[in-house]
Amino acid sequence: MFHTPNLRGVRKALIPKRLNEGWGLQHMKLYGFDDEIILSGANLSKDYFTNRQDRYHLFSSKSITDYYAKVHDAVCSLSFKVQPNDKVENRFELVWPSRNPAPSPLEDKSGFKSAASALISPLLKPTSTPSPRKSKTVVYPLGQFTPLMSDENHSTEHPGILSVLRTLSREDFAKSSWTFTAGYFNMHRELKELLLASKSDLGTVVTAAPEANGFYGSAGVSGYLPPGYLILARRFLEEVGKVRGGEGVELREWRRGVVGQPGGWTYHAKGIWITLPEYTSPSLTVVGSSNYTRRSKKLDLEMNALVITDDKELQKELAGEIEHLKTYAKPLALEDFNKEDKKVPWETKVLLWFLSWGL
């Protein structure tokens, strides 16, 4: 079990367990077997197989699977081992194996990060000689491992996505389009600025309605999260108005029933799709665990893939993926926030400032 080096000592003792994930966690979703691997944003609990919308991409490739297996194994070697122990209340204990290449993050944060960085960084750097292209589809792994980096951060997710989005600001991409989605709508400021500055004819953002948020109706602080994201959605539309005159970017709210009620679904999909000029279907997508937030960049371990394809059938599949997500996503306009079901409790507005760093 991975433990972030950001939570230790007095802070760890004082922070309630329900809130401690706000200091970072292992967020990668990698499901591999033999020469195949599924990249997803799903945790594979029961609701993901019944009433929770997510994405799943299967890669049938030994080299790709082996790469993600190396990342998985590296993080495992930087984690605690769970052992049964009937003598303690939980009946298990976390043990730091002596064979681990780093000291425990709870005992030596600096030493842990130094050793972890030396182990992870080589996996994030490109190979010296790229393999020859034999396929119509190219896959670039993108990882974010900021909590494990000691000095220079070699993470590739954030800079890789920024590099892709910067191309959309070029005039020759004026006829392109893009789609962005995240179950928790709090995209990193740099990503948002690039999307709003794009020359694309149309950009679409799909996000969860409060009724499709897993925290909807929950007790305590977490119950304020769904309306909190509603505030962020409104701010986004206001920025669309300021930057683009309200044109060229639409926000869609995904809702399929009400979570906790019969037939109610939650929304957990995340990803980016780009359709190039003169194309009718996406040629590029990002799939994986990241929600593209400040937290994803700074606190969590994330693993994704940037897929670029000229395969017409795969492009059609990517287009179908977008259309499926839009099936339950209705356009949201600024005037909609004046409706009764979009009014936000004053407590949420007060708490948003305190919670936004961990959303």
Image (cartoon, rainbow, N blue to C red):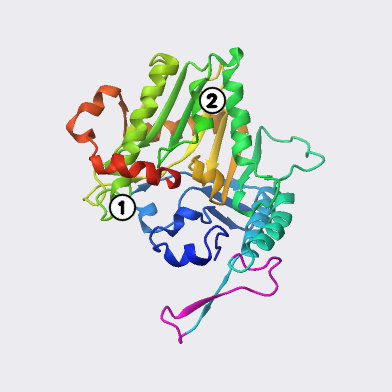
Q: Residue furthest bottom?
A: 87
Q: Residue at x 27, y 53 (%)?
A: 218
Q: Is residue 257 above or below residue 318?
A: below
Q: Residue furthest right?
A: 129
Residue 14 located left or right of residue 304: left
Is residue 191 visible in the rendered image? The answer is yes
- Kind of residue sitting beneath label 2: Leu
Q: Which residues are magenta?
A: 86-105
Q: Residue 287's x, y, as percent?
A: 53, 41
Closer to us: 106 or 211 = 106
Residue 169 located left or right of residue 67: left
The main secondary structure of the magenta stretch is: loop
Q: Residue 211's x, y, as percent?
A: 27, 43
Rounded to the nearest whole Å, what is the CA distance between mark 1 and mark 2? 32 Å
Q: Residues within 10 Å of mark 1 (few under 14, many from 20)?
A: few
Secondary structure, mark 2, is: helix
Q: Which residue is mark 2?
A: 194
Q: Count numbered badges in the picture.
A: 2
Q: Which residue is mark 1?
A: 221
Q: Residue at x 34, y 52 (%)?
A: 50
Which disc, if any, is residue 202?
none
Q: Is residue 102 magenta?
A: yes
Q: Residue 243's x, y, as percent?
A: 45, 17
Q: Is residue 15 above or below residue 63?
A: below
